[in-house]
Amino acid sequence: MTSSQETTSASPYALAAAAANRLRTLTGVARHDVALVLGSGWLPAVDALGTPRVEISSTELPGFAPASVEGHAGKVCSIAVGDVNLLVFLGRTHLYEGRGVSAVVHGVRTAAAAGCRAVILTNGCGGLRTEWEPGTAVLIKDHINLTAVSPIVGARFVDLTDVYTARLRELCREVQALDEGVYVQFPGPHYETPAEITMVRAMGGDLVGMSTALEAIAAREADMEVLGISLVTNAAAGMSGEPLDHEEVLAAGKAAAGRMGELLVKVVPRI
Ligand code: 8IG
């Protein structure tokens, strides 16, 4: 099968298996242990994790498309962090790119096929609590999926009672004291209206973004443990009196990158 046929006709799981095989060839690593997805504002944190064995453009792997959002590099690298073979995705596919929900979770499924038993999902997001200044990292304790879709097709009733496992959250809090919050995934690409933020508050949400929940669902389907960490890069719409701006997101990430890298380098070997 040619790689273009793979991207159009294979099942999402077969496509992920093909990507994982290609990863094995390109990295020389038979099995990765933990995956890390770096979202908006998190890319500079990769430097703290050590020198990658190899850096691969994700377009070299079946099923990945070029990155389209500034701050999302579209690269995959393999890093030895202590005894852990870490697979790092520098950037992700978002639902608003229009490639469908299976493209959104392809990285997570590839990580599962590559042997990963846990995934760390990071993102930049809006915060609903005034005490969370831009640059604050918050542990995701649960999510609300407002995209109206699921990555799972067919009657597979995946349990989501402990998606962001207590074990990994505790481990993370031993490294650094962090608040926890409920992450609400919107489809985007527009930000919320102030009325939608009022709704989010009423339904128990603390963080708003355009990623993570769908990937977490796919990870649970694949029996991986999930650790979710949000970097609050802006106050949610209507809270500050200022309009939201993607440049603000990137600037907050740059400022926080050192601290985020330190956190990850301590957490990864303990997973
Ligand atoms: I960074 O305020 C970032 N991503 N939906 N809302 C949503 N996504 C975001 C936000 C935000 N900030």
Image (tube, grey):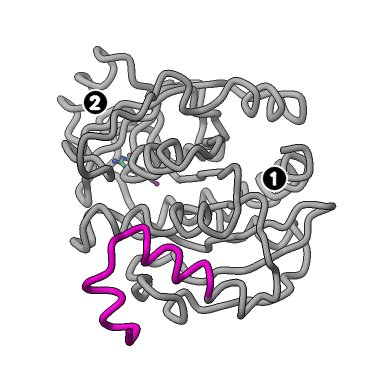
Q: Badge 2: few (under 14), some or many (20 or more) residues near its Cα, within 10 Å?
A: many
Element at badge 1?
helix
**Callout 2: SS:** helix
Region in magenta: 1-21
Q: Nearer the viewer, residue 155 or 109?
A: 155
Percent coordinates x, y for residue 142 in the rendering: 43, 23
**In the picture shown, does residue 232 fall above or below 265?**
above
Q: Residue at x 43, y 21 (%)?
A: 129
Image quadrant holding the C terminus, namely top right
Q: Residue at x 40, y 75 (%)?
A: 62
SS majority, magenta: helix
Real-space Cα separation, disc 2 to disc 1, in angstroms: 30 Å
Residue 4 colored magenta?
yes
- Relative to 118, say whether 132 is above or below: above
The residue indicated by pointer 2 is 197
Residue depicted at x 57% and y 60%: 114
